[in-house]
Amino acid sequence: MIDLHGIISAYRGSPELGALVEGRTASALTFAGRYRLVDFALSNMKAAGIHNVDVVMQKDYQSLMDHIGSGKDWDMSKKSGGLSLLPPFGMGGNKGAYSGLLEALLAAEPYLRRMKENNIVIMPGNLAINIDLDAVFKAHVASGAGVTVVCAENVDNGECHKYTTDEQGNVVETLYQRAGSTVAGVADLEVYVVNKEVLLEMLDFSAAHMRYSFHADGIREYLKRGGKVHVYLHDGYTKQINSIADYMKANMDMLCREHRKSLFPVERPVLTKDRADVSTYYSEESQVINSLVSDGCYIEGVVKNCILAPGVHVGKGSYLENCIIMRDTYIGDNVTLKYVISDKYARVETSKELVGSDNIPVVIPRAYTT
Amino acid sequence: MKKTCIAMLLAGGQGSRLYALTRNVAKPNVPFGGKYRIIDFPLSNCANSGIDTVGVLTQYKPLMLNSYIGNGQPWDLDSSDGGVYILPPYMVEGEKGNWFAGTANAIYQNIEFMENYNPENVLILSGDHVYKMDYADMLREHLEKDAALTIAVQQVSMEEATRLGIMNVGEDGYINDFEEKPAHPKSDLASMGIYIFNYEKLKKYLIEDEADPNSSKDFGKNVIPNMLRAGEKMWPYRFEGYWRDVGTITSLWDANMDMLSPDLINLFDEEWPIRSRTAVRPPHWVGENAEVNHSIITEGCEVEGKVENSVLSNSCAVGEGALVTYSVLMPGAKIGPGAVVEYAIVGENTVIEAGAHVGTQPDGSEEWGVATCGPNITIGEGAVIPAGAMIYESVEGK
């Protein structure tokens, strides 16, 4: 069995996702129609043969817990170990949001000290990625580093942490790239493999100095102490979802076959909670162009460049273009929607017209009737 | 522990009339309606009717069926005080094991299984029917009429009646006669092959039938006529909903086409869901130049050509310029660019290469029929498969 323990960080609030994260965390957001963002981290950990996985959450976790359940859809419902959901143990000394990954991990410290594995992989729950964690782990062991950081050559968010490396791929300098600026190096995807004793050392430092940033207080301090940090380059499609613009872009990217194959390869499937819907029905009047359509939809109208989640109804004479429609949305007859994100259970009544634009889509909140 | 009713599902049939599709799987395991296997219908009906103990009797090519059913979890049949059990033929002390010799013998050989549950009634089902039915309602009528046996029946036309098992009913409403394929039917009530027996009666007649060396050990031919002769109370349960036997290529194709008419059988019904075990695949993608009309499509498909009046199961591909019309694509079937598939059934993971032509439109001739390509074969570039063909080996291209 792989000597690697999994931690999925799903504690972070994402204010720029607006109405989409009302009552849920970004990790629980619908992605590419039938998935939730957290499915990527869970499925990648399962594929690598990781037996024990913790999900660290802080608030608005109801929707995430409902989706993950016992973890059986990822084969993580086990008699010994398996999946642990870690909401905060009461508020304790911490009155507000966790100010960094290290503070979130401190809240789960008793778990971390008890774990049997000697290495931990940490992944954010809101990252769309499909990565061979077994290969990352092997590279980590081969490098002899205490920390391995998964990086990409480029990320399009602008803001990110970056690293310059030597010829062996070991970190020389850590940098921060602000939005609108460009600094040298490769971009941090916030996927880490850490030796257990290095992580516990970071937590001791963090608690003693009340400094909780994984980059500034974890990685940078570890480098200062003479530690070795290795970079693993990932070249497939990847995007962290922190804003409505990210959400729109990443979903629409899935209409491109190359990106879709990169996130959903047959050999490393992304698993999710299965609703067991029926096949989608297309009526004689329907017309669907360049769209991703989940099971359980009923389509009588025109759908162009859209992502449809399971159980969506599109009525006669309706026209949808560049929309993301979440599960069980009911769209009546003769409706026009362009650049609309509709949250689940929404209803759009007959003859309505809603038009957003590519950078400011209209968001219909959950269970809202227009 | 005592159960009011358990179900025994006969799933051992070879399905010889579907032979291109059932060379390696039992008939109940044949894909159906985009998302399903035929056995999903009786299993889901059991779960929805509150019957939590189901014995599945397997015999012909059971491996795929065993792994498909697994612990019954997809149908919520993985309960701690019941569940779904695969019941293959087995060896007994001092004798060689016996294959199931007929429907009645198959149940007879599993009396020991049924005894474990001490049931009051036993529901006998076939694994080759497509329908939604509330067995709890049938059981209620069975108990109300104090019947030894209740048989589900459906009204058919007098012409169809000559090809089916027909129940004649007396003035009191009970069955007083049973005729297999009568030349001059006296009634239009056809048996659907769905029975609820009082368990003690079932056991008695099975043991008697087993001892009869001249019996062919069949419910329709032996057990039911014996019960009639003995004057047992037998009640017809009239079922009016959609029900199809899918034992032939034509009926399998017809029933698949029925899935395109939600008024005939509504699979979107949340009150009566039909469940299945499927791999998670991404939503299906319909391309820029694709055209889809009056069809059902399942996740994992990639459609770039034209699809009309067809059923696409999961993970199928239809290449650019290809046409799929009035056809059924089973999971993983791939239709190459420019190929034409009309009035056809294409088996699991079969590849129809570019420019090939499978099937033709009905031409009014006697010989015309649906073309069938079995699973895991390749129909080469430009090859032509005529109407009515049954192909189970790869065909080279031109």
Image (cartoon, rainbow, N blue to C red):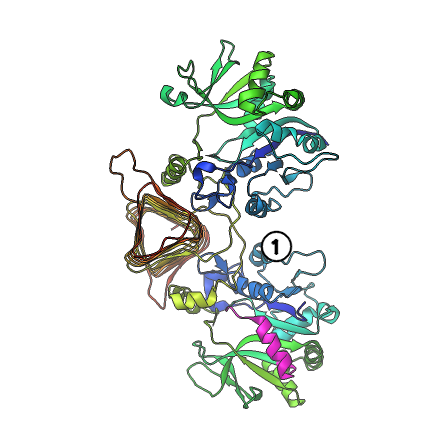
At 59% from the left edge and 43% from the top edge, which residue is drawn? B76
Please give the residue where the numbered disc 1 appears in the rendered image. A72
Residue A161 on the magenta span = no
At 61% from the left edge and 75% from the top edge, which residue is drawn? A137
Could you tell me which chain the residue with mark 1 belongs to?
A
Residue neighbourhood size for the residue with mark 1, other residues' Cα within 10 Å, grouped as few (<14), some (14–19), many (≥20): some
For residue A284, side relative to residue B16 (left or right) = left
Above/below status of A338 relative to B59: below
User: In the rendered view of the protein, which quadrant contains the C terminus of chain B?
Assistant: bottom left
Q: Can residue A354 be seen in the rendering of this structure?
A: no
For residue A150, side relative to residue B340 (left or right) = right
Above/below status of A121 relative to A300: below
Image spot of residue B45 (x, y percent): 53, 35
User: In the rendered view of the protein, which quadrant contains the N terminus of chain B?
Assistant: top right
Total numbered labels placed on residues in the image: 1
- Point out the stretch of residues depicted in magenta: A129-147
Image spot of residue A189 (x, y percent): 52, 76
Q: Amino acid at mark 1?
A: Lys
**Image quadrant in which you'd find residue A289:** bottom left
**Image quadrant in which you'd find residue A143:** bottom right
**Image quadrant in which you'd find residue A364:** bottom left
At 43% from the left edge and 69% from the top edge, which residue is drawn? A246
In the image as oriented, which residue stretches furthest toward the top?
Answer: B171
